[in-house]
Image (cartoon, helix red, strand yellow):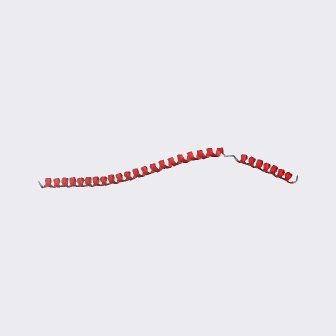
Amino acid sequence: MIGCLSQELKFDCLSLQVLIFDWRLLYELNLIGCLLQELLGALQTHILDFTQRLHTVEVERRHLVLELNRMKDECADLPQKEDIEMLQDQLSSIKGKVHNMQYKFDYK
């Protein structure tokens, strides 16, 4: 009877150790699970923030591209450097002619 009792106690002690190990393992896994959930939540928040900033930047980029194209169109309508130089030459020529005409009238 004593042999059976000691075997039962050994079995019960072993069962208790297994239960304690299982409980600790489950507790640690639960802690790890909680940490993983927190990390996942933080990661989702960062991804959402990044996605929102990316969207905002893309909208701004599109706006700037439209504005650049509008300005290019406006600049295309402006006279070019060659046109300006030609007009300046014509103006100088006209001024010279006017000056010559004034000189001729002054001495007549």
Give the quarter of the image for residue 16: bottom left
Please tell me which residue is depicted at 23% across the width and 53% down the height of the picture.
19
Q: Could you tell whether 11 is left or right of 56 in the image?
A: left
Name the outermost residue toward the right. Answer: 108
Query: Measured from the top left, where is residue 71 in percent x and y?
Result: 60, 47
Name the outermost residue toward the left. Answer: 1
Residue closest to the eye, 59 or 89? 89
Q: How many marks?
A: 0
Please tell me which residue is depicted at 59% across the width and 47% down the height of the picture.
68
Residue closest to the eye, 84 or 56? 84
Give the quarter of the image for residue 3: bottom left
Query: Measured from the top left, where is residue 10 in percent x and y?
Result: 19, 55
Residue closest to the eye, 89 or 23? 89
Q: Could you tell whether 90 is left or right of 57 in the image?
A: right
Query: Measured from the top left, where is residue 85 in percent x and y?
Result: 74, 48
Please tell me which residue is depicted at 66% across the width and 46% down the height of the picture.
78
Query: Measured from the top left, where is residue 13 in percent x and y?
Result: 20, 55
